[in-house]
Image (spheres, rainbow, N blue to C red):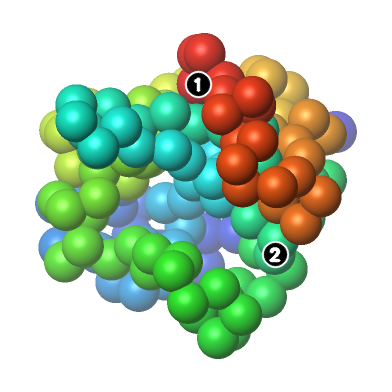
Amino acid sequence: MKDPIPRDGLRPGFWKRPLNTLTPREWEALCDGCGKCCLNKLEDADTGQVFFTRIACRLLDDETCRCGQYEERKRFVPECVVLTPKTIAKVAYWMPSTCAYRLRHEGRPLYDWHPLISGRAESVHEAGESIRGWTLPEYEIPEEDWEDHIIEDL
């Protein structure tokens, strides 16, 4: 059964355009819905290397891989980074390597499983590229134990 992606008001192939030319709706539609950016990360102060953990932001819905309070996320999680065409250059290094925003910032194409390419929102989950069902809520794991939950490959 096809799970179509609504494309009303979106320019054909908009994701191939420079990020700073996207409309706000196109920018939001670029997200593949994997949820990886909502995983808590640890950064080595000496090397700058970023390590993803399986510890999810308290607002992340583990089944939908979406923020439960997206429009008000900064109110609940002040440290949440609001990704925009202006901020992507500063934060791309800690975005997942499969992230559409990072890929396009780096001039690379989207993967075939990306919903904009496949035409189906579920394709990211079917390809095993989302965090659906395997995260731990941050309120259950003390921050000093986050190192124990580092993900090797993401």
Q: 10 Å neighbourhood of mark 1: few (<14), some, or many (≥20)?
A: few
On the rendered image, what quadrant is the N terminus found in? top right
Q: CA distance from mark 1 to mark 2?
A: 20 Å
Q: Residue at image x 42%, y 51%? A: 30
Between 114 and 141, the one nearer to me in the picture:
141
Compared across the picture, whether 150 is left or right of 27 comes to right
Between 136 and 71, the one nearer to me in the picture:
136
Q: Residue at image x 61%, y 80%? A: 76
Q: With respect to residue 63, does 99 lie above or below?
A: above
Compared across the picture, whether 102 is left or right of 47 comes to right
Q: 10 Å neighbourhood of mark 2: few (<14), some, or many (≥20)?
A: some
- The location of residue 111, given as percent across then percent down, is 43, 23
Q: Secondary structure at mark 2?
A: loop
The residue type indicated by label 2 comes to: Leu
Residue 154, disc? 1
Residue situated furthest front in the rendering:
144
The residue at which mark 2 appears reads as 59
- The location of residue 154, given as percent across then percent down, is 50, 21
Q: With respect to residue 82, does 116 lie above or below?
A: above
Q: With respect to residue 83, does 46 lie above or below?
A: above
Between 17 and 107, the one nearer to me in the picture:
107
Specify which label sits upstream in the sequence, 1 or 2: 2
